[in-house]
Amino acid sequence: MLVSAKEMLNKALEGKYAVGQFNINNLEWTKAILLTAQECNSPVILGVSEGAGKYMCGYKTVVGMVKGMIEELNITVPVALHLDHGTFEGAKACINAGFSSIMFDGSHYPIAENIEKTTALVNTCDILGISLEAEVGSIGGEEDGVVGMGECADPDECKAIADLGVTMLAAGIGNIHGKYPANWPGLSFETLAAVKEKVGNMPLVLHGGTGIPADMIKKAISLGVSKINVNTECQLAFQEATRKYIEEGKDLQGKGFDPRKLLAPGFEAIKATVKEKMELFGSINKA
Ligand code: G3H
Ligand code: ZN
């Protein structure tokens, strides 16, 4: 079922687990994530960056593909189709195309402008039953052209945005997109606790889920994180499995060059990564 992320995240917050957002790039990615969610009886959020949306021929194509798969693969677990790090224009385009969830990333604007633009989307999303994620502070590193300095969020600014009526809030707490450097000091649980204190029962979102140690993930969930975004880790797993297949010369044997065979090891690697994350986040059997 294609649903808003509101109910699944409120349930996760109450049940002290997190729902994974896994970014999609194409048919194989989408199919791997949906099938794994169904097998694990877990709710799931499919993340689409603006770059990935363009790559997949536009948001309407993405909506058609996801809805078609949900129906034809008999996916009965709750699925949210979510714009990841969207601009204001991107958010409006995804709302029009039929996404069930939106992230408007206004973190690079002065807080007054972030509030103003987020407010405009709160009203539209409310009327249409679409969940809305906002961001305060910033996520370090780069993801699909979105660059952040990684400054920790100001808890008072988090409260100002949360009070607008968004569904979930991403707060920068020292998290980084992509691989974490060896000298990374870890998540700032002090910031997370201070944000939680200010925003109360608002599901919090942890971006940069790739490579965060399990104990930090568990602690973040215990402090109110209900949604964790993972992108790079699926890409690395896909790349490694595909490389192995080619380096072993399997593409040259039999009909190994058939794209359906060539892409199969990467597809299985994404499935294994998603399952591992769902286990770690505690969302298995929570559909
Ligand atoms: O918005 C998506 C993410 O925050 C994913 O981050 O690529 O580091 O896993 P990641
Ligand atoms: Zn992110």
Image (tube, rainbow, N blue to C red):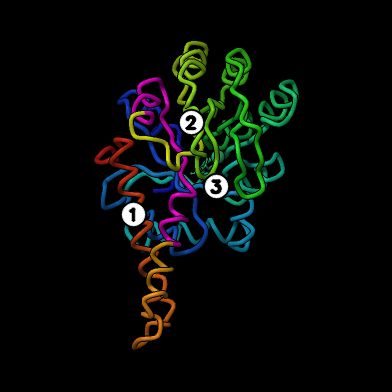
Q: Examine the structure image and report whether residue 161 is included in the region drawn in magenta.
A: no
Give the distance between the C-alpha atoms of the residues marked 1 and 3, in whole angstroms. 17 Å
Query: In which quadrant of the rendered image does the C terminus lie?
Result: top left
Most common secondary structure along the magenta stretch:
helix
Which quadrant of the structure image shows residue 70?
A: bottom left
The residue at 52%/32% (across/down) is 175
Local SS, label 2: strand
Q: Amino acid at mark 2?
A: Val
Q: Examine the structure image and report whether residue 231 is included in the region drawn in magenta.
A: yes
Q: Nearer the viewer, residue 105 or 99?
A: 105
Task: Determine whether, in the image, residue 48 is placed left or right of residue 224.
Answer: right
Tell me residue 226's x, y (percent): 41, 30
The residue identified by callout 2 is 205
Earlier residue among tags 1 and 3:
1
Q: Nearer the viewer, residue 96 or 266?
A: 266
Q: Amino acid at mark 1?
A: Ile
The residue identified by callout 1 is 75
Q: Can you name the residue that lies furthest to the front here?
A: 183
Task: Assess disc 1: are there few (<14), some (14-19) or many (≥20) residues with their C-alpha within 10 Å of its C-alpha.
Answer: some
Earlier residue among tags 2 and 3:
3
Any mark on residue 99, and which? 3
Task: Assess disc 3: are there few (<14), some (14-19) or many (≥20) residues with their C-alpha within 10 Å of its C-alpha.
Answer: many
Whereabouts is ligand 2, in terms of quadrant? Answer: top right
Tell me residue 22's x, y (percent): 45, 47
Magenta-highlighted residues? 216-239
* Rendered view: 5 above or below 193: below
Earlier residue among tags 1 and 2:
1
Tell me residue 220's x, y (percent): 40, 25
Any mark on residue 147, and which? none
Task: Assess disc 2: are there few (<14), some (14-19) or many (≥20) residues with their C-alpha within 10 Å of its C-alpha.
Answer: many
The residue at 50%/39% (across/down) is 180
Local SS, label 3: loop
